[in-house]
Image: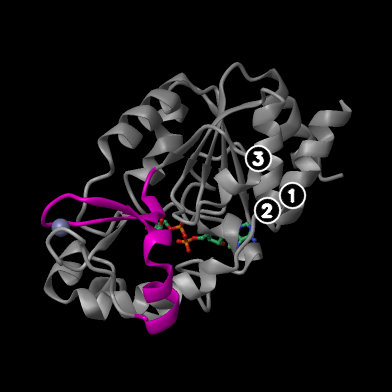
Amino acid sequence: MDINIVKAAEILQSARYAIALTGAGISTESGIPDFRSRGGLWEKYDPAEYATIQAFCSDPEKVWRMLFDMSEITRNARPNPGHRALAELEKLGVLKHVITQNIDNLHQEAGSKSVIEYHGNASRLECLSCGEQYQREQFAAALLGERTPPRCGKCNEILKPSVIFFGETIPPDALARSQEAAQKADAVLVVGTSAVVYPAAGIPLIAKQNNAAIIECNTEHTGLTGYATDIFILGMAGTTLPELLRQIQSS
Ligand code: APR
Ligand code: ZN
């Protein structure tokens, strides 16, 4: 057993208030490419052209071409053992919350109850012009069949997924809840994020200011690793998180 997993298990077991911060890396084993690894989404779509709120407002049909590709991929995605291990750690009372940058709903589908959606959730849609809210299922045919951008039933504007584009602010409730959790945390499990996008990447640093232990699970070192991380667990989250769970359950 990797000594880092043994040490991480000890920290999480003795933690008073442990939280997790996840990024796209926890969902790659569910078939959803991340953003910045080789073959990631930003290799195919320039985020400056497709992922800013300005891009969406100026040419929503163009941004929906990327969104259709993303929903094709996420439509068949299911939680993997990494998501399920975090849900189990919450059930065991080890993890208080999962703060996720992901919009794929896989933590909720894996059974995590306290999920703070830092960048929103692609299963909801909203109208920027009249504020009407919708569930994605209401447009299943349009989204998966004809690939026509869904329109508001009230004002006929093209709808936007309720996810945070670059240039938008983090939902106030998610921001407040995650800052509060980070301030209270004495352990943060950082899984599958390159930790380059703020303010999400600042969450472990808030906890660190209160001497929280930072445990990082990733397939590569990140900007956090040499700076804030106390224990680095190298590997695929779908393998390392279940090992961490087993270590906690067996001791
Ligand atoms: N197990 C563990 N780590 C993994 C795995 C895996 N199976 N697969 C990839 N990773 C790691 C990569 O090494 C990388 O460090 O996950 C990280 C993914 O980084 P990004 O692609 O940058 O994704 P993320 O950190 O979530 O991006 C943050 O940027 O584009 C915006 O809004 C978008 O929420 C996203 C934010
Ligand atoms: Zn409307």
Label annotation for residue 237: 2
Q: Residue furthest front?
A: 153
Residue at figure coordinates x 17%, y 49% from the top left: 131
Q: Type of residue at label 2?
A: Ala
Dot 1: element:
helix
Mark 1–mark 2 CB contact (< 8 Å): yes
Classed neighbour count for the residue bearing mark 2: other residues with Cα under 10 Å, few (<14), some (14–19), many (≥20): many
Dot 3: element:
helix
> In the image, which is nearer the foreground, mark 3 or mark 2?
3
The spot of residue 121 in percent (x, y) is 40, 51
Q: Type of residue at label 3?
A: Leu
The spot of residue 158 in percent (x, y) is 20, 68
The residue segment tinted magenta is 118-147
Label annotation for residue 86: 3
Classify 112 as above or below 186: below
Instruction: Give the residue at mark 1.
Output: 240
Q: Does residue 1 belong to the magenta stretch? A: no
Does the closest atom of ligand 1 sit within 8 Å of the Cβ of label 1? yes
Dot 2: element:
helix
Classify 40 as above or below 163: below
* Residue 41 seen in this snapshot: no
* Residue 189 seen in this snapshot: yes
